[in-house]
Image (cartoon, helix red, strand yellow):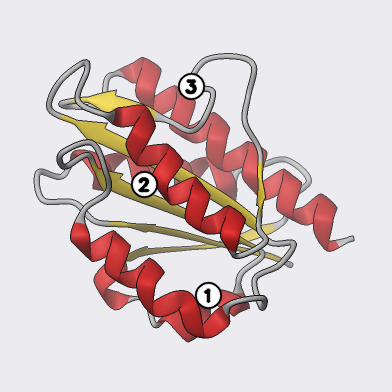
Amino acid sequence: MTRVLVTYFSVSGNTKRMAEEIAKGAKGAKGAGAKVVLMPVKDVDPRSLQEYDAIIMGSPTYYGTMAAKCKALIDRSVVLHGKLDGRVGGAFTSSGGRAGGNETTVLDILKAWLIHGMVVQGTSDGDHYGPVAVEVPDEDSLASCRAYGARLARLAKKLRG
């Protein structure tokens, strides 16, 4: 069974709402057979990351990058350097404004996954790097989240062989 972790940090509830929809998409992904765990970053033991085939992290955008709590988990994951190779990584964010740094936040998370040797999949349609929302996620953002969760769960299943 494909195991997917959707982890997030959220103060306003916007990023958490997106995480819930990504988890819903991953659970419902046709043919993926995914077991999905939805968990705040504060509850994630970095060593447990190697239990998952896909790790999708969400953060609000603070000053053009991820929240310190997300960065702290990534920093603590250094003990796994080389052990997440070939797993799927994903990222999503919410911000308070249209030009608040959504893409830079997603890319910062994806860069960490790439350094871990993880596989990152973009899309030519919609949110190219990962789902983003401005303030309260609208239905377009939530649909993007569900599609993203499903796509990454299917990719993780495919890569598991």
Q: Which residue carries the number 2 mark?
A: 19
Task: Give the vertical position of 61 relative to 126 (above or below).
Answer: below
Q: Say left or right for 28 vs 18.
A: right
User: Is 51 in front, or is 107?
Assistant: 107
Left or right, 113 with respect to 160, comes to left
Density class for disc 3 (Cα within 10 Å; few <14, some 14-19, many ≥20) is some
Percent of width and height locating residue 75: 37, 72
- In space, the residues marked 1 and 3 are separated at their CA atoms by 25 Å
> For the residue marked with disc 2, what is the amino acid?
Ala
Instruction: Give the residue number, with chain letter if any, for mark 1.
Output: 49
Q: Earlier in the sequence, mark 2 or mark 1?
A: 2
- Image quadrant of residue 50? bottom right
- Left or right of 30? Residue 47 is left
> Disc 3 marks which residue?
127
Q: Residue at x 56, y 81 (%)?
A: 80
Mark in front: 3 vs 2 = 3
**Distance from the alpha carbon under mark 2 to that under mark 1:** 17 Å
Q: Give whichever of discs 1 and 3 has the lower sequence position.
A: 1
Give me the C-alpha separation between circle 3 and circle 2: 15 Å
Left or right of 33? Residue 98 is left
Mark 2 and mark 1 residues within 8 Å of each other at the beta carbon: no
Q: Secondary structure at mark 2?
A: helix
Residue 144, x across and y down, in percent? 47, 25
On screen, 91 above or below 136?
below
- What's the amino acid at mark 3? Asp
In this view, the residue in front, 150 or 84, is 84
Q: For mark 2, does the 10 Å Cα neighbourhood hold few (<14), some (14 to 19), or many (20 or more) residues?
A: many
Residue 4 rendering spot, x and y as whole percentages: 57, 61
Query: Which residue shows up at 34% across the image and 71% down it?
Result: 73
